[in-house]
Image (spheres, helix red, strand yellow):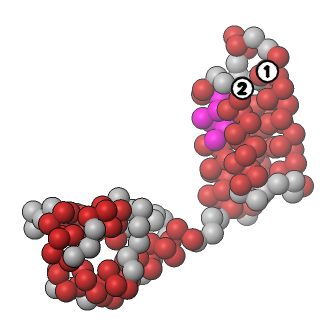
Amino acid sequence: MIPTNRIPAHPGEVLLEDFLRPMNLAQTTLANKLGIPVQRINEIVNGKRGITPETAFMFAGEFGTTPQFWTTLQANYDLSKARPMTDAERAAEIVAAMDHALASGDPNKLTSVLNVIARNGWGGGTPLAAVIHWVRKAVEEARTMATRNWPPPAASRAKAELKKVARHRAA
């Protein structure tokens, strides 16, 4: 079963925490036993490479598991990463970007909020149009005002509009 409240552990984390460390087995030792480059094991452990069917058979033979154990770990991880964000998660990401930008005191970071909005596919929809307007106004204000006036007044309005959108989309 794929957890909905978090991304499951990458198979490489399972390899490291449940097999390599308890068995006091080095990545190089495992690679040599399997006759594969150590880089392949290292990339799996670091989550930069997935488990292929070939690797699943090798790990199954070495650790006394099944190939399905390894491919299921990989499938669950991949499915969880590909799960579309809910509107509430999107709104939370945008609010976090806004909070980060305001806490930084850097006007350029406010522009990153617009990037997060665009990345989440909330471009110019009617409810979000007000948020985009107020974030842009906050960017303009921040670039023209003295730092002692931080945060720009429009930023507060943008955040209030964003919370309205989040409530509207969650309903």
Closer to the camera, 111 or 154? 111
Residue 99 forms part of the magenta stretch: yes
Residue receiving disc 1? 143
Label 2 – label 1 distance at C-alpha:
6 Å
Please identify the quadrant where the N terminus is shown: bottom left
Q: Where is residue 83 shown, x and y percent of the image? A: 58, 71
SS state under label 1: helix
Q: Mostly what secondary structure, the magenta segment?
A: helix
| Left or right of 133 on screen, residue 35 | left
Q: Say few, some or many: other residues with alpha carbon within 10 Å of mark 2 (under 14 / 14 to 19 / 20 or more).
A: many
Residue receiving disc 2? 107
Residue at the spot 76% in from the left edge and 52% down from the top edge:
118
Residue at the spot 64% in from the left edge and 23% down from the top edge:
105
Q: Specify the quadrant of the image occupied by residue 82.
A: bottom right
Q: Where is residue 38 shown, x and y percent of the image? A: 26, 64
Q: Say few, some or many: other residues with alpha carbon within 10 Å of mark 1 (under 14 / 14 to 19 / 20 or more).
A: some
Q: Where is residue 144 shown, x and y percent of the image? A: 82, 17
Closer to the camera, 87 or 78? 78
Identify residue type, mark 2: Pro
Q: Is residue 147 above or below residue 53?
A: above
Q: Is residue 18 above or below residue 155?
A: below
Q: Specify the quadrant of the image occupied by residue 160.
A: top right
Closer to the camera, 161 or 15? 15
Q: Where is residue 30 shown, x and y percent of the image? A: 18, 70
Q: Is residue 50 above or below residue 52?
A: above
Please identify the quadrant where the C terminus is shown: bottom right
Magenta stretch: give its range.
97-102
